[in-house]
Amino acid sequence: MTLLGRKLKSGPLVSVIVATRNREAYLPDLLESLAKQSFRSFEVIIVDDSDRKESRKAVSLTVRRFLGSLKIKLLRNPRRLGIPRSLNRGLLAARGRIVAFTDDDCIVDRTWLENIVRWYRYPNIGGVGGRVIPVDNDARWVPEHRPYPGVVGKVLRSGEVVSNFDLDVGPVLVDCLPGANMSFRRDLLLKAGGFSQAYEGNAYRFETDISLRIKRLGYRIVFDPRAIVYHRRAPRGGARVNAYKWNYWFARNHTVFLLTCLSGGTVKTAYFAVKETVRILKRRRACPYAYPDTWHKVLCAVLRGILDGIVVGLRYAVLRNHDYIGYLRKSTYTTYYKARLLSEPLLTHASTCIALERHNPRGNVG
């Protein structure tokens, strides 16, 4: 690949971190796609959060199978830790200057890492992600109507988050990235304190939380539609729960997000509670992969989730700048990807970065 007109045999080392739980049938397809990447200077870190012995054994066998084509580290959690804590474990084990994340039920495009890495030659870019295209089972749940067509990764003043990460839009600056297709500079993740442990269950909004904290450090986040991940949405394993539990965790975690990440969180939480009540009374589905049968159970789950989220959110709001990987941070080294090493002028304006990439999509200048 080329960066700023110079041919590089190996770019900055990337660490690809994948948290997996009881999805041993899907993991081989992800690793197969990673083995075919056009960008080769990367390692893979699998954090096994499985709670079944047969799943853990199958994951170990899968990792052994790919040791010849991939540099893989396997970390086993002593107990179920959930997504944020698992990713923090992977972050501490990562050697890469750039850390990329995807899900265990995904398949990455051959040029996924190549299209992510090229953006980090700009020193003001702190995070890069791309499209998450629903396929197989996930394609059943693509919305027919979008309230904000053409808008990607935007946090509205009301606290609502517009995703639309499947759209072919951009490259464009965004507020947040999808958990199945995101990357950040490792030193910024450490400086931000890692992923917040406040997000439990389905960990809804954990990726939005870290994206905003990276932005608060003064960096920009780019959505590049050429960095493609295909999401199959496994019916079981991972953080998958039924529609009622999903609504509970959705309400609980979004409330935590409103209170800990945004100003005026109390007012935004009240608005969210009213909006969700109206949505449920109109019997509009929110869970992306299941329809509930009993709507009063959905209402109870959402209201209980909001109340629990208020308790947790207020507690974590005091720790807004908390270092979630704490004392372990001192034992990790931090590396930096400096554009100066490429002997080219630094580009510090985000719009200039995007204009250059659109003009030279392969990273050549001049």
Image (cartoon, helix red, strand yellow):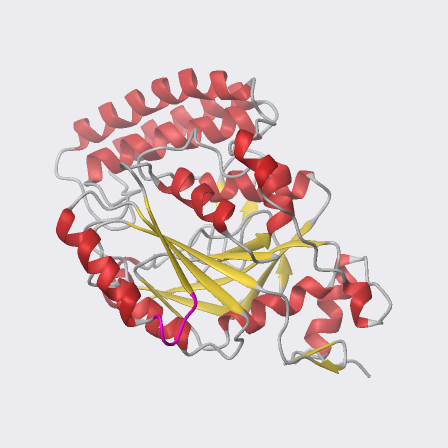
Front residue of 145/210: it is 210
Question: Which region shows up in magenta?
Answer: 67-71
Residue 362 rendering spot, x and y as whole percentages? 65, 80
From this view, report whether residue 310 is shown above or below residue 80.
above
Residue 313 falls left or right of residue 221: left
Residue 287 falls left or right of residue 358: left
Magenta segment includes 32: no
Asked if residue 363 can be seen in this view, the reply is: yes
From this view, report whether residue 119 is shown above or below residue 48.
below
Front residue of 210/273: it is 210
Residue 253 rendering spot, x and y as whole percentages? 40, 31
Residue 100 falls left or right of residue 118: left
Residue 190 falls left or right of residue 131: right
Quadrant (top left, top right, bottom left, bottom right) of the N terminus: bottom right
Front residue of 39/64: it is 64
Asked if residue 151 can be seen in this view, the reply is: no
Instruction: Name the residue rendered at 32%, 71% in the picture.
Output: 66
**Number of numbered discs:** 0
Overall secondary structure of the magenta section: loop
Instruction: Name the residue rendered at 60%, 35% in the picture.
Output: 330
Quadrant (top left, top right, bottom left, bottom right) of the C terminus: bottom right
Residue 341 rendering spot, x and y as whole percentages? 79, 67
Asked which quadrant contains residue 297, the reply is top left
Residue, far front: 331
From this view, report whether residue 107 is shown above or below residue 268.
below
Instruction: Name the residue rendered at 39%, 43% in the picture.
Output: 86
Instruction: Name the residue rendered at 60%, 50% in the picture.
Output: 186
Front residue of 105/80: it is 80
Residue 87 rendering spot, x and y as whole percentages? 43, 45
From this view, report whether residue 328 is shown above or below residue 91.
above
